Amino acid sequence: IAFLNLYLEAMVEVITRYGGTIDEIIGDAILVIFGAPLASEDHAAKAVACGLAMQLAMAEVNQRLTAKGATELEMGIGINTGRVVVGNIGSVRRTKYAAVGANVNLAGRIESYTTGGQLLISESTRTAIKTPLRLDAEFLVEPKGATRRLQLHEVGGIGEPFNLSLPARSRELRPLPQPLPISFTILEEKFVGRTVYPGCLVAISATEA
């Protein structure tokens, strides 16, 4: 609990600085909304800038964790932009300000495709942002329950007025002396697919192949 709170305290401080509203904290997951309850025209840009700042803040979080003898943490962030229903939801005995709707669920789906250190955004978020973005990669995914494929973008930086950038994740691939035969399957969100394919690794780095 002490390690979890150390991480959450750092993230909540960043979220507050960028004007995010914390909808819910579930274990180590944080659901944040931008543009409500106070309207904001650049809510999508603020959300992306906040996500980048959260990833950058993980360096200090991990320094503090390792100093206490804990293992370093990695975090993935998914962002989606769209219409949602917000308001006080609950009963007379218990109520809370929350956001509900398909676009909230889609943000969760996008997050499920992330790996540690990644910030993935939907196409609707990308088109809503006028500030220049550094896009490091693009993916086509098929979320469960969705009627069509979803275009995702990996964000590595954002320009004025935020000026935030993450260190490059990709490292130079080194060719292998001989191709390495492998069998692989496709990840469907975070679940392993059932179909196994043959293939070969021809180049690798510490994090990619």
Image: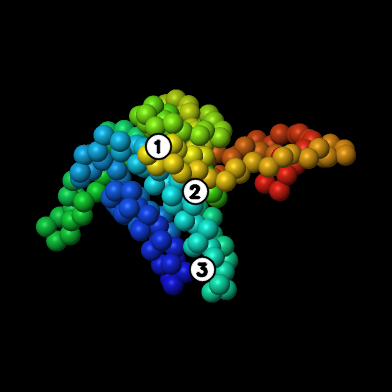
> Distance of mark 1 from mark 3, alpha carbons?
30 Å
Question: Which residue: 46% across, 33% down?
Answer: 133
| The image quarter in which residue 103 lies | top left
The residue at which mark 1 appears reads as: 160
Let me know if residue 158 appears in the view: yes
Quadrant into which the N terminus falls:
bottom left
Neighbours of disc 1 within 10 Å: few (<14), some (14-19), many (20+): few
Q: Say left or right for 185 vs 155.
A: right
The residue at which mark 2 appears reads as: 76
User: Which of disc 2 and disc 1 is earlier in sequence?
Assistant: 2
Question: Which residue: 18% across, 53% down?
Answer: 90
Q: Secondary structure at mark 2?
A: loop
Residue 61 in the image, given as x and y percentages of width and height: 49, 62
Could you say which is closer to the camera, residue 148 or residue 169?
169
Quadrant into which the C terminus falls:
top right
State whether residue 197 is above or below residue 74: above
The label nearer to you, 3 versus 2, is: 3
Mark drawn on residue 104: none
Q: Amino acid at mark 1?
A: Glu
Q: Secondary structure at mark 1?
A: loop
Neighbours of disc 2 within 10 Å: few (<14), some (14-19), many (20+): some
Q: Amino acid at mark 2?
A: Gly
Outermost residue, bottom direction? 68
User: Which of disc 2 and disc 3 is earlier in sequence?
Assistant: 3
Q: Amino acid at mark 3?
A: Arg
The label nearer to you, 1 versus 3, is: 1
Let me know if residue 120 appears in the view: no
> Distance of mark 1 from mark 2, alpha carbons?
24 Å
Mark drawn on residue 64: 3
Residue 42 in the image, given as x and y percentages of width and height: 30, 36
> Distance of mark 3 from mark 2, alpha carbons?
19 Å
